[in-house]
Image (cartoon, rainbow, N blue to C red):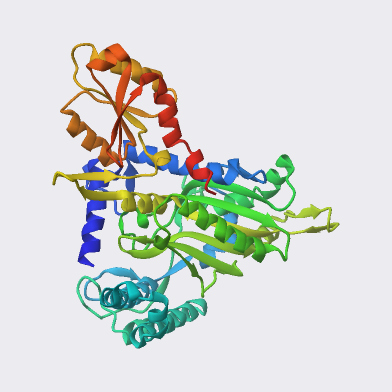
C-alpha cells in the first residue's frame, strides 16, 4: 500500500512539475477537488478526445456528434429523475467531524479484503514458480474462497440496502464491520442520510423573478432531448447513435484521489438508439467494442476488467463498468448501460411531446431503447498518465524519468533541438521547425546541454527528438532519437514529415479497433 501511495504522489508531482495539471486558483490556496490542465495537459487531453471522437463518430457511419448546452430547462432534471433520486448516502464521524460516502467506506473495506486475496496469490506464485496455476489456486484455496465469499456477501447486502433505501441497514453494516474513520480511527458515526449531488444556480436579472437552474450532472440528457432533432436532420434509421463530449458538475461528498473524482469533470458519452427487444444484444456488442478501444492504447490487458452491476440504476436493465488498475487499485473507468426507454418516455411525459421513431420494417411507431457508453475523460487521462510514467535505470547506471505515452496522444510530437545556438545551427533548426509546424505540434529549444534537453522531452512524453548539428548544414541530414528505445538514427530532413507521421498518426490506434 505504501508503495502504491508513493507511486500516486509521484504522478501528482510530475503532473504539476511538467505542466500537465495544476491545482485551480492556487494563488488563493486552491479549491478542493478542482484542477486546471496546463499547457501539456491540455494537449494530451485534446488528443484523447480526438481518439475517442474519431473512433466513435468518424469510423461509424451511424453515429453523429453534438454539443449541447450545460444549462437546460429545469424540468429536464425532474423528468430524468435527478431532482428526486440523484443522491449519495452521506455519513459523518461525530469525533473527527469529517464527512464520508457510506457506500465508499464499505467498498474500501472490501478493497482491503481483495488486497489480502492478491497477497495470497502473489505468495503462492513465488512459492510454486513456473508450476503455479493461478486459476486452479483461486478456485480451490480455502483462504481465497473465504475472502471472496465474505466480500461478495458484504457488497450484495450493501447493494440491496441501497436499492431499498434502507439507510439504517447501511449504518448497521458499517458498525458490524467495525469500519473506522480512516484518518482518526474513530467509529462514532451519525445516521446515514441522502445528499443530492446537483449544483443549483439562478437564471434572471433579479432575485425576485429568477428561475432555479442546475449545472448539468451528466451530458446524456442533452442527447435525449435532441433525439428527434438529430434523427430528422441526419435522416438516420435505427440503430444509430449520438455522441457528445462535455463538462458535467457534481457536488461530491468526498472528492478525492486527484482528478479521479472531481466536482467539475468532463464526460465522453454515446447514446445508441435501438429497437425494443434488441437492446441487450447491442449492450453486449458495445461492452466488447469499448474494451477493445481501451486495449488498443497498449496499457496492458491485465489492467482492465469488467464489473457487472448488482445494484442497477433506476433507468437500467443491464449495466457494467470497465475498471482500470489505478495506483490506488481497480476503479471504474467507463460505464456501459442498457437504459431501456426510460429517458425518452420520461421526457415525453414531462414535455407533452412525442419522442418516437417510425420503423418502416415493423410498420409501427415506438419509443427507442438506449444503450449508453460513458467514459470519464479525466479518469481516462489519469489512467494513461499514471501507467505511462516510469523511472528507468540505464545501462550506464544513470536514471531517467520517461512518460511513454502512445505517440498519437503525446502533447508534443517532436522536439527540434539545435546542438548549439551559433554557427547557423539555430537558423537551420528554425527552418526545419517552421516547415513541420503545420502538420505537427512541435517544441523548439536551444538552452542547456543536449542530454538535459532529451531528458526534459522524455519526461513530457515526446516521441522524437530531432538534433541539428554542423553536418546538417552541408548534407541536410539530422539525428532523430526515439523516446522509448533512445536509439539515434541519421535521416534526411526531407524524410522527417513521413517518419513523424508514421509514428504519431491516429491510424496506428484506430486500425486496431
* Residue drawn at the location 64% of the way across and 54% of the way down: 272
* Residue drawn at the location 33% of the way across and 53% of the way down: 387
Image coordinates of residue 327 in percent, x first then y, are: 30, 60
Q: Nearer the viewer, residue 54 or 135?
A: 135
When asked about the image quadrant of residue 349, the answer is bottom right
Residue 351 in view (yes/no)? yes
When asked about the image quadrant of residue 88, the answer is bottom left
Image coordinates of residue 105 in percent, x first then y, are: 34, 73
Residue sitting at the far front: 131
Residue sitting at the far right: 363
- In this picture, residue 200 sits left or right of residue 57: left
Image coordinates of residue 218 in percent, x first then y, are: 51, 54
Image height check: is 61 above or below 132?
above
Q: Nearer the viewer, residue 275 or 211?
A: 275
- In this picture, residue 335 sits left or right of residue 104: right
* Residue drawn at the location 22% of the way across and 49% of the way down: 391
**In the rendered view of the protein, which quadrant contains the N terminus?**
bottom left
Residue 116 in view (yes/no)? no
Image height check: is 239 above or below 164?
above
Image height check: is 83 above or below 193?
above
Q: Nearer the viewer, residue 335 or 86?
A: 335
Amino acid at each position: 500500500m505504501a508503495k502504491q501511495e508513493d507511486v500516486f504522489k509521484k504522478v501528482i508531482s510530475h503532473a504539476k512539475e511538467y505542466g500537465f495539471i495544476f491545482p485551480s486558483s492556487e494563488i488563493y490556496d486552491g479549491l478542493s477537488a478542482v484542477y486546471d490542465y496546463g499547457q501539456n495537459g491540455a494537449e494530451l487531453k485534446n488528443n484523447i478526445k480526438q481518439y475517442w471522437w474519431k473512433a466513435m463518430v468518424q469510423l461509424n457511419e451511424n453515429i453523429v456528434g453534438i454539443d449541447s448546452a450545460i444549462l437546460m430547462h429545469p424540468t429536464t432534471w425532474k423528468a430524468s429523475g435527478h431532482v428526486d433520486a440523484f443522491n449519495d448516502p452521506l455519513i459523518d464521524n461525530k469525533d473527527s467531524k469529517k464527512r464520508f460516502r457510506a457506500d465508499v467506506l464499505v467498498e474500501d473495506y472490501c478493497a482491503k479484503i481483495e488486497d489480502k486475496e492478491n497477497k495470497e496469490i502473489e505468495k503462492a506464485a513465488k512459492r510454486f514458480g513456473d508450476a503455479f496455476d493461478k486459476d486452479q489456486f483461486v478456485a480451490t484455496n480455502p483462504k481465497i474462497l473465504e475472502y471472496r465469499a465474505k466480500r461478495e456477501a458484504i457488497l450484495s447486502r450493501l447493494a440491496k440496502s441501497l436499492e431499498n433505501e434502507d439507510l439504517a441497514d447501511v449504518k448497521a453494516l458499517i458498525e458490524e464491520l467495525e469500519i473506522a474513520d480512516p484518518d482518526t480511527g474513530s467509529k462514532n458515526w451519525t445516521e446515514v442520510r441522502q445528499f443530492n449531488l446537483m449544483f443549483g444556480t439562478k437564471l434572471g436579472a433579479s432575485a425576485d423573478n429568477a428561475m432555479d437552474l442546475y449545472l448539468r450532472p451528466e451530458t446524456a440528457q442533452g442527447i435525449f432531448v435532441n433525439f428527434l432533432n438529430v434523427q430528422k436532420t441526419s435522416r438516420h434509421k435505427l440503430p444509430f447513435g449520438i455522441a457528445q463530449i462535455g463538462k458535467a458538475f457534481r457536488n461530491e461528498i468526498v472528492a478525492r484521489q486527484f482528478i479521479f473524482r472531481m466536482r467539475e469533470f468532463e464526460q465522453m458519452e454515446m447514446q445508441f438508439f435501438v429497437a425494443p427487444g434488441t437492446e441487450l444484444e447491442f449492450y453486449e456488442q458495445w461492452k466488447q467494442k469499448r474494451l477493445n478501444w481501451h486495449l488498443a492504447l497498449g496499457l496492458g490487458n491485465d489492467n482492465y476488467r469488467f464489473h457487472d452491476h448488482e445494484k442497477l440504476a433506476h433507468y437500467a436493465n443491464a449495466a457494467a463498468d470497465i475498471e482500470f488498475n489505478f495506483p490506488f487499485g481497480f476503479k471504474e473507468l467507463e460505464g456501459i448501460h442498457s437504459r431501456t426507454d426510460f429517458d425518452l418516455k420520461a421526457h415525453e411525459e414531462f414535455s407533452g411531446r412525442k419522442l418516437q421513431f417510425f420503423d418502416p420494417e415493423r410498420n409501427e411507431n415506438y419509443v427507442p431503447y438506449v444503450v449508453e457508453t460513458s467514459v470519464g475523460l479525466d479518469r481516462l487521462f489519469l489512467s494513461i498518465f499514471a501507467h505511462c510514467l516510469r523511472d528507468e535505470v540505464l545501462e550506464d547506471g544513470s536514471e531517467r524519468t520517461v512518460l511513454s505515452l502512445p505517440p498519437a496522444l503525446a502533447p508534443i510530437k517532436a522536439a527540434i533541438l539545435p546542438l548549439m545556438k551559433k554557427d547557423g545551427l539555430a537558423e537551420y533548426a528554425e527552418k526545419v521547425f517552421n516547415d513541420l509546424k503545420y502538420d505537427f505540434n512541435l517544441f523548439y529549444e536551444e538552452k542547456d546541454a543536449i542530454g538535459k534537453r532529451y531528458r526534459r522531452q522524455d519526461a513530457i512524453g515526446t516521441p522524437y527528438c530531432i538534433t541539428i548539428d554542423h553536418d546538417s548544414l552541408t548534407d541536410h541530414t539530422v539525428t532523430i532519437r526515439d523516446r522509448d528505445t533512445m536509439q539515434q538514427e541519421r535521416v534526411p530532413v526531407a524524410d522527417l514529415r513521413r517518419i513523424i507521421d508514421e509514428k504519431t498518426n491516429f491510424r496506428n490506434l484506430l486500425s486496431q479497433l
